[in-house]
Image (cartoon, rainbow, N blue to C red):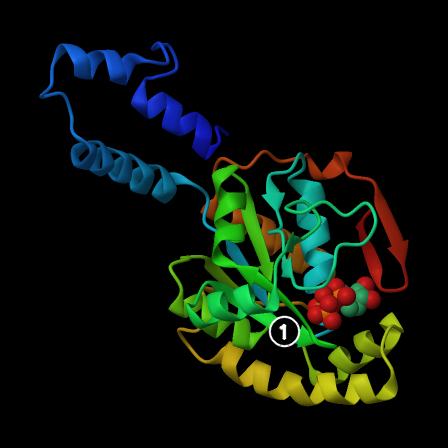
Amino acid sequence: MPSYHDKVIHSLGIATLPDNFLGERKERSPDFLNTQQLSTIFTTIHCSIMSDLPKPVVFCGPSGVGKGTLIEMLMKRFPNDQFGFSVSHTTRKPREGEIDGKHYNFTTVETIKQEIDEGKFVEYAEVHGNYYGTSIAAVEAVRKESRICILDIDIQGVMKVKESSLKPIYLFIAPPSMDELEKRLRGRGTETEDAIKKRLGNAKKELDYGQQSGNFDRIFVNADLEATFEELVASFKEWYPELDEVAPDDEPKNCTSNGCWIS
Ligand SMILES: Nc1ncnc2c1ncn2[C@@H]1O[C@H](COP(=O)(O)OP(=O)(O)OP(=O)(O)O)[C@@H](O)[C@H]1O
């Protein structure tokens, strides 16, 4: 799909015009569009293009429910960077090889605090004195590449997004039961006992919020992984008809006792 940049060029029809077109035009005709008129034209074009770009999609659900697994499968079914993740901001110093704007947007505590106060961040956290966060601009940058920006965020993040200018599709992934959620968290083997208890405690509040009507566009109960994934694929094809799909038979699969998924 054409990017924001391609669409601006196309809309203005300036791709084939000489660089000094506006300057020359103004010399010949002083009444030619003034700055304010040009600004109105640009704003109209910008708004129209932005509204055509793919909406971001929010994945929310308790830890261990399978969000990451489903997102990975989606990216395999719809390959070639049709989905993207925003570049996070951080106030920590860049490590060797890290590029500003690519691995992180490096910033200062003073700047990020001010931008958080101005409502420019969808979510943020302070970890060991450093801030990390996702800005609205970073999400819009992914949209401008005509990619579906995936936001895997918690309930607090969802509430912030709802106050922002982003108009995403909100998905909630629910477990079939609390016992099954606990089984998955333990089975993953990545958390300490304390962390598992904390996550299960949070899950109850998250499920209450997630299942309240109107908070999410669609709720998926991730019982059987393959079945949930196919439901998700059907929804994505409905929301984003332009998505290019790899035929399921062409996808290599991995199988374990948990079932099969696409590798
Ligand atoms: N439907 C399913 N049935 C059985 N196991 C599943 C299912 N979906 C995911 N899992 C397994 O559950 C575990 C947790 O999944 P995953 O890491 O994707 O969760 P998550 O929601 O992304 O968690 P977090 O928010 O903590 O990152 C993984 O081991 C995954 O393989």
**Relative to residue 45, is residue 161 drawn left or right?**
right
Can you identify the residue that label 1 sits on?
Answer: 125
Residue occupying the point 44% across, 73% down = 215
Quick check: which quadrant has ligand 1? Answer: bottom right
Q: Position of residue 258 (x, y in %)?
A: 85, 64
In the image, is residue 26 above or below residue 164? above
The picture quadrant where one finds residue 260 is bottom right
> In the rendered picture of this protein, how many numbered marks are placed on residues?
1
Q: Position of residue 253 (x, y in %)?
A: 84, 45
Amino acid type of the residue that numbered disc 1 sits on in the rendered structure: Ala
Given residues 256 and 137, the one toward you in this image is 137
In the image, is residue 65 above or below residue 261? below
Residue occupying the point 53% across, 48% down = 236
**Relative to residue 188, is residue 216 drawn left or right?**
left
Q: Position of residue 221 (x, y in %)?
A: 62, 69
**Relative to residue 128, is residue 220 drawn left or right?**
left
Q: Position of residue 106 (x, y in %)?
A: 65, 55
Q: Is residue 241 visible?
A: yes
Residue occupying the point 76% across, 84% down = 179
| SS at circle 1 | strand
